[in-house]
Amino acid sequence: MPAERSVLPTHRGPSVVAPAGDGVVVVPMRRRHLRGVVDIENRTNHRPWSLSLFQGELRMPTSRRYVVALDGHRVVGFAGLMLTGFEGHITNVAVDPDHRRRHIATRMLLVLFREALALDVEDLTLEVRVTNRGAQDLYRGFGFSPGGVRPNYYNDIKEDALIMWAHGIGTDEGRARLDALTDALPVALAELVVDRAG
């Protein structure tokens, strides 16, 4: 059965994906979330970002959008988007290893895609390790396809990065893909919009 969605308009802020079943919500990242974000970053990234780097990203609200997935008050995932004109770059997507297989990454990407659409972004790109097939499959579901390789991008582990692009995310086909991904989630979602200052 398709998920039910309602949209409350506002002038600012990304969507909040609020599932009816499992308690996980996706909200804009705030400074109060950074302890949990850095903990996940240190557990999942071989070259983790520092606290100060995340703090710097949050100080650029006109060109950055970051979200966290919360299970109650606990941060269980985070994702980021950097805006450059009509293009966007997914900077990172990470989920607490203890909370994987709950479609948390999919929910966060749905929020970032809808935020990009609201800002008239046409194309999105990202880098992913060439051996990370699971992440590549996730991204392909959002319309990303390979666009090149950055040799030795992850030089500390001697691994190349696959560059992936999702073009025309605002086309009818792109929007239908997002709706299908939302409908395929195992929990019914209510899609709300909240004020970024909240």
Image (cartoon, rainbow, N blue to C red):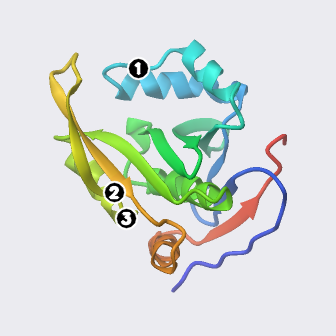
Crowding at dot 3, Cα within 10 Å, few <14 / some 14-19 / many 20+, comes out as some
Reading the image, the residue beneath label 3 is: 143
Instruction: Check whether the beta carbons of the residues at disc 1 and disc 2 lie within 8 A of each other.
Output: no
Instruction: Name the amino acid, label 1.
Output: Pro
Instruction: Name the amino acid, label 2.
Output: Leu
Q: Residue furthest front?
A: 85
- Quadrant where the image shows the C terminus: top right
Q: CA distance from mark 2 to mark 3?
A: 9 Å
Q: Compared with residue 185, is residue 154 higher up or lower down, i.e. above or below?
A: above
Q: Earlier in the sequence, mark 1 or mark 2?
A: 1
Q: Position of residue 48 (x, y in %)?
A: 40, 20
Residue 133 disc label: none
Crowding at dot 1, Cα within 10 Å, few <14 / some 14-19 / many 20+, comes out as some
Reading the image, the residue beneath label 2 is: 138
Comparing 72 with 43, the one in front is 43
Q: Compared with residue 135, is residue 190 higher up or lower down, i.e. above or below?
A: below
Crowding at dot 2, Cα within 10 Å, few <14 / some 14-19 / many 20+, comes out as some
Q: Is 105 left or right of 59, judged from the image as shown?
A: left
Q: CA distance from mark 1 to mark 2?
A: 22 Å
Q: Is 190 left or right of 77, judged from the image as shown?
A: right
Residue 115 image-quadrant placement: bottom right
Q: Secondary structure at mark 1?
A: loop
Q: Secondary structure at mark 3?
A: loop
Reading the image, the residue beneath label 1 is: 48
Q: Position of residue 106 (x, y in %)?
A: 46, 57
User: Mark 1 or mark 3, which is nearer to you?
Assistant: 3
Q: Position of residue 31 (x, y in %)?
A: 71, 25
Q: Earlier in the sequence, mark 1 or mark 3?
A: 1
Q: Residue at x 31, y 61 (%)?
A: 140
Instruction: Check whether the beta carbons of the residues at disc 1 and disc 3 lie within 8 A of each other.
Output: no
Q: CA distance from mark 1 to mark 3?
A: 27 Å
Q: Residue furthest bottom?
A: 1
